[in-house]
């Protein structure tokens, strides 16, 4: 899943719930959530968003942030403190698409 929306309601009502249930209910064997752009700034500064990220991490869902974006927002260190892996994601996303991963974007 790629989370790029700055709309907290989208994440609280849709993206976090789907990612969590996809893993916990066994709908998918592996779930990755990639924060890209505005969601990274929200993740660094919004307590409720951070709590949702921790639930995903506790459910063994990999949460990754785009390093280029988080550096631009000045939040890379804050994201790592939360437990989010911070990496350049262009190559990762391209590889996942080539490996036939399915993509949802919120």
Image (spheres, rainbow, N blue to C red):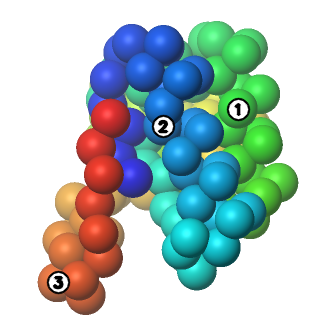
Please tell me which residue is depicted at 28% across the width and 60% down the height of the picture: 103
Q: Of helix, strand and loop, which one carries label 2?
A: helix
- Tell me which numbered mark, 3 or 1, is placed earlier along the sequence: 1
Mark 3 nearby-residue class (10 Å; few <14, some 14–19, many ≥20) = few
Badge 1 is on which residue?
Answer: 52
Q: Mark 3 to mark 2: distance in Å?
A: 23 Å
Query: Residue at 74% of width from left, 53% of height from top?
Result: 57
Q: Residue at x 61, y 12 (%)?
A: 45
- Give the CA separation, mark 1 to mark 2: 10 Å
Q: Is residue 25 above or below residue 18?
A: below
For the residue pair 4 and 14, the one nearer the viewer reads as 14
Residue annotated with mark 2: 15
Position of residue 33 measured from the top left corner of the image (x, y, whole percent): 49, 52
Residue at image location 68% in from the left, 38% down from the top: 53
Q: Quadrant of residue 30?
A: bottom right
Would residue 68 be found to the left or right of residue 97 on screen? right
């Amino acid at each position: 899943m790629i989370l790029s929306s700055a709309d907290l309601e989208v994440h609280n009502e849709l993206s976090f719930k789907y990612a969590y249930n996809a893993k916990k209910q066994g709908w998918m064997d592996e779930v990755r959530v990639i924060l890209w752009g505005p969601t990274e700034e929200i993740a660094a500064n919004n307590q409720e968003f951070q709590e949702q990220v921790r639930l995903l991490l506790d459910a063994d869902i990999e949460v990754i942030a785009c390093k280029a974006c988080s550096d631009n927002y000045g939040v890379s260190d804050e994201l790592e403190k939360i437990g989010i892996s911070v990496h350049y994601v262009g190559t990762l996303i391209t590889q996942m698409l080539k490996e036939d991963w399915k993509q949802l974007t919120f």
